Image (spheres, grey):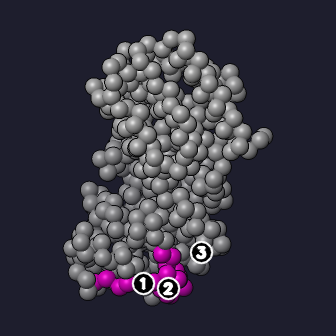
Amino acid sequence: MAVREIAPGVHAVGAVDWNLRLFDALIGTPQGTSYNAYVVKGSEKTALIDTVDPKFEEDLLKNLMRLGLGSLDYIVINHAEQDHSGTLPLLLEMFPAATVIADEKCRDLLLRLLLVPEERIRIVKDGEALDLGGKTLEFMVTPWVHWPETMMTYEREDGILFSCDLFGSHLATSELYADDFMQIRPAAKRYYAEIMMPFRASVRAALERVSALDLQVIAPSHGPLYRNPVLILDAYAEWTSDAVKNLVLIPYVSMHGSTAKMVSFFTDALIERGVEVQPYDLTRADLGEVAMTAVDAATIVFAAPTVLFGPHPAAVHASYLLSILRPKTKFVSVIGSYGWGGKTVQHLKETLSHLDAEMIEPVYVRGYPGGEDLAALAGLADTIVKKHEDVVPRS
């Protein structure tokens, strides 16, 4: 990433990872990502806010050289995860006079994850400020806005919020700003679904704090910046609210066609009753898209056959991921087919019990679905319609 000015004395100096396709060996990143770092230079002191993933340390050092920085006074670490802090050990060697700024929990993690010398770290508390000379950094400790030690940094004079992972997106782009928000929105929603959604209550509390600031720019740690902050703030207000849509998400897998037949019939039954439906074949689906749909869905219905004595592994994987992502879904159920026995329904019920959602009686049949089985699916569709009437706002 080229060095670019955000405001006088404030520059973006991070790196773009154009080719990344799997983040943390877990999260799909079909559009790559960026590791954003920022320099804030006051009349007296200079601070670097966050670093980059270690494999891009050379890019960061080159950008600091392009700015002509012979020294750094402070290195602010908003988050200890290595894609934010991984270059810190090298920077402490390069800038021996620099002091690391972190909150107490972040300090503890930096000591363990990166073996940073404790004497190089200065702990800051929520609301504490650091005067750089005409540039004031105010620290906002926001635990569980992704990790227990996360912090945001607000530069008062220019109204710039360095928001850490909040409001980020895994998106490699040459554009510094997300001016075309409708183009950026899917990546931002995917990021929210996969990373922020498990901590929806904490994110909502942080959103209230952020909304009270005089904001000119939101500068996250991944993806483009927002110089029209209301766009991403409004999107987060929607995603973190309790409101759901008249939408049923159906993650499914079928081995010999029985479960697929049930999904096809059930999908049509819901559509005929005026319910939006989004089925995903788990053998080929992008789980990031499944998570994005879960942000809005009033109901999730898992459809899976029994493999030996339990659910198909693809359904186990997806149900586990959704259970830890904790969408605001109100209802869940299970449909599918078995041959001679097993505990598929019990297993999926136990996994989905981690969601704060009502379990609707499953429809699980032996063999290929016949007339009575299809009638039971129609009954399930009727039940979902009635349940949605109580939770989905009327248009």
Looking at the image, residue 133 lies above or below residue 31:
below
Looking at the image, residue 295 lies above or below residue 333:
below
Q: Residue at x 48, y 37 (%)?
A: 290
In three-dimensional space, the C-alpha distance between marks 1 and 3, rounded to whole angstroms, equals 21 Å
Viewer-side residue, 33 vs 383: 383
The magenta stretch is 120-141
Looking at the image, residue 119 lies above or below residue 369:
below
In three-dimensional space, the C-alpha distance between marks 2 and 3, rounded to whole angstroms, equals 18 Å
Residue 127 in the image, given as x and y percentages of width and height: 53, 83
Tell me if I can see residue 198 in this picture.
Answer: yes
Q: Nearer the viewer, mark 2 or mark 3?
A: 2
- Asked whether the beta carbons under mark 2 and mark 3 sit within 8 Å of each other, the answer is no
Residue 391 in the image, given as x and y percentages of width and height: 68, 45
For label 1, the residue is 124
Check residue 122 for magenta coloring: yes
Query: Considering the image in quadrants, where does the C terminus appear?
Result: top right
* Number of other residues with Cα within 10 Å of mark 2, as a class: few under 14, some 14 to 19, many 20 or more: few
- Left or right of 195, for residue 248: right
For label 2, the residue is 128
- Asked whether the beta carbons under mark 2 and mark 1 sit within 8 Å of each other, the answer is yes
Q: Amino acid at mark 1?
A: Val
For label 3, the residue is 158
Tell me if I can see residue 176 in this picture.
Answer: no
Check residue 371 for magenta coloring: no
In the rendered image, which quarter is residue 276 located in?
Answer: top right
